Image (spheres, grey):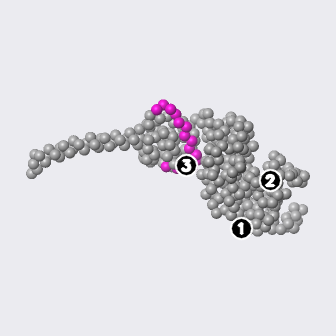
Amino acid sequence: MSSPKLQLDVERTKLLIVPLALLGLWFVVVYLFAPVGGKEEKRIVISTGTSTRAIAQELKRAGVISSPLGFRIAARVEGISGKLKAGSYLISGNSSTWQIARRLAQGNTDELAITIPEGYNTRQIAALVEENGVGTKGRFLELVRSPSEELRALVPELPEGKDLEGFLFPDTYRLGPGDGEEVLIKMMLKRFTQVAPKTVEGSALGLYETVILGSIIEKEAKLQRERPLISAVFHNRLQKGMRLQSCATVAYVLEKNQAKLSYEDLKVESPYNTYLKGGLPPAPIANPGLASLRAAARPAAVDYLYFFALGDGSHHFSRNYQEHIQLQR
């Protein structure tokens, strides 16, 4: 039988534990899930393919949640972890962690979607930007051709003195109210950094050279299955010291449709003219998608040196000049 003193100590312990448990619960709720406070809205841009963990860290950096762990717990409890939607969001400090998680899962944005097609060069993208009311062609081209240190820092692989051609990754981007040319460029550069380096791992060329070659493949190839074959032709020519002789590089210089080039056009004096200059052109001629980047890094194991268009989007590939000429007759 316990003594009255022991019973008193147990009761006192219970009285102490309950407030401590309530205090701990209050801390968990406030620190992990409660709004951080404040009426100021912060813009959060979520790129396609961003993980829940990375989103939580971005929300913390922006100051709209207190705890990345709390956000991940909320997303898991709600069954939406891994299902948060890309886009541009204005988030108030008065929003709770639960509210933010649910909103990102619903994709509840007030934004403009703009799609950048694979193979567009900066001039074409600039025109698209203006057509969609995102900004002006002039301002877009200014930012791309003379990128700030802030923009350059987003793509560490960009060589000194080069502009952003080739790194404006083609995809669909969602812009919020007030977002302009610079916001769009940042989104494209971040997307490139997110997907391109791992796509071209193992390439015999450096990353920048792979982007250059990928941009040429993007402009030359019409069929998915032919990208590795076209890549092989260019790799084989580079290894043998042959000129690439790509019509796409001349079309880039002259701003013409490459299907309408004349023999005189092929004589244009330019470092981009691969009919006259050896090696790769000095910079990308377009902004390639993943398939062309992958093909540039992983050419087919064939010994083709020539190809020509058949008129239906496909090409005929040849191992020597005689066969190449004979098949065109």
Q: Secondary structure at mark 2?
A: loop
Quarter occupied by the C terminus: bottom right
* Disc 2: which residue: 272
Q: Residues within 10 Å of mark 2 (few under 14, many from 20)?
A: many
Q: Residues within 10 Å of mark 1 (few under 14, many from 20)?
A: few
* Disc 1: which residue: 301
Marks 1 and 2, Cα distance to the nearest angstrom? 27 Å
Residue 216 coordinates in the image, percent (x, y) = 75, 55
**First in sequence: mark 3 vs mark 2:** 3
| 49 drawn magenta | yes
Camera-nearest label, 1 or 2: 2
Write the residue at 67% across / 52% down: 158
* Disc 3: which residue: 50
Q: Is residue 5 above or below residue 321?
A: above
**First in sequence: mark 1 vs mark 3:** 3
Image marks 1 and 2: residues in contact by CB distance under 8 Å? no
Q: Is residue 218 visible?
A: no
Residue 60 coordinates in the image, percent (x, y) = 48, 43
Q: Is residue 193 visible?
A: yes
Residue 78 coordinates in the image, percent (x, y) = 44, 45
Q: Which residues are magenta?
A: 38-53
Image quadrant in which you'd find residue 114: top right
Q: Is residue 172 left or right of residue 218?
A: left
